[in-house]
Amino acid sequence: MPNIKVLESKKAIVDALSEKLQNATSAVFVDYKGITVAQDTELRNKFREAGVEYTVVKNTLTRFAANKIGYNQFDEVLNGTTSLATTTGDPIAPARIVCEFAKKNKNVLKIKGGLVEGTVMTVDQLKGFGELPSKDALIAQVLGTFLAPISSLAFVLDQIRQQKEGPAPAEAEA
């Protein structure tokens, strides 16, 4: 019979993992087999900069936590070496960082599965998210698209103004 203190500590871990998965905008399960200490440190720094929490998890406890909140789909992926990257911020960040890191480091990491905004995603879907630019880059692209017509309009209006006023004094002397 297991020790009551051990059972209580495991229940606390399951509860914490359940809460983490439930509150996350995205969570990605990663197979980290073969990663070196230096690579792991670099990866953790990248996650930290992006506001992503990265932890090595026990498969059985994580399976209990996922099942507790209704994510039975992860039962088959929770085996072997497993880590979990979660965020409450940019939902694309964990998948993007894992994909970029895997490309740079000869596929050391492999995405096992995950969820985005409460929806379970396949490995291919998460890899697709990994190819997208960050949330800030996407916002900058949208704003740039909005600004282009306004900038063009301002340039055209300035040209019309210059035509009506005639050449500027410095241009007339030259």
Image: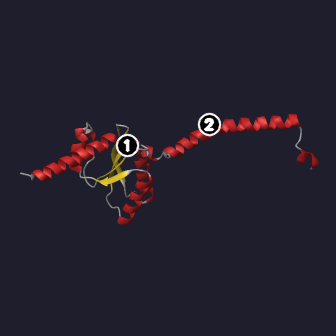
**Residue type, label 2:** Phe
Quadrant of the image occupied by residue 45: bottom left
The answer to whether the residues at label 1 and label 2 have Cβ atoms under 8 Å apart is: no
- Residue annotated with mark 1: 26
Residue 1 visible in image:
yes
Q: Residue at x 90, y 45 (%)?
A: 169
SS for callout 1: strand
Question: How busy is the neighbourhood of tag 1: few (under 14 within 10 Å), some, or many (20 plus)?
Answer: many
Position of residue 133 in the picture relative to residue 3 (left or right): right
Q: x, y percentage for residue 39?
A: 39, 62
Q: Is residue 84 above or below residue 41?
A: above
If you read the primary sequence from the N terminus, does the residue marked by circle 1 or circle 2 appear first? 1
Report the Cα–Cα distance between label 1 and label 2.
Answer: 29 Å
- Residue annotated with mark 2: 146
Q: x, y percentage for residue 11?
A: 18, 46
Q: Residue at x 39, y 50 (%)?
A: 52
Quadrant of the image occupied by residue 126: top left
**Residue type, label 1:** Ser
Quadrant of the image occupied by residue 19: top left
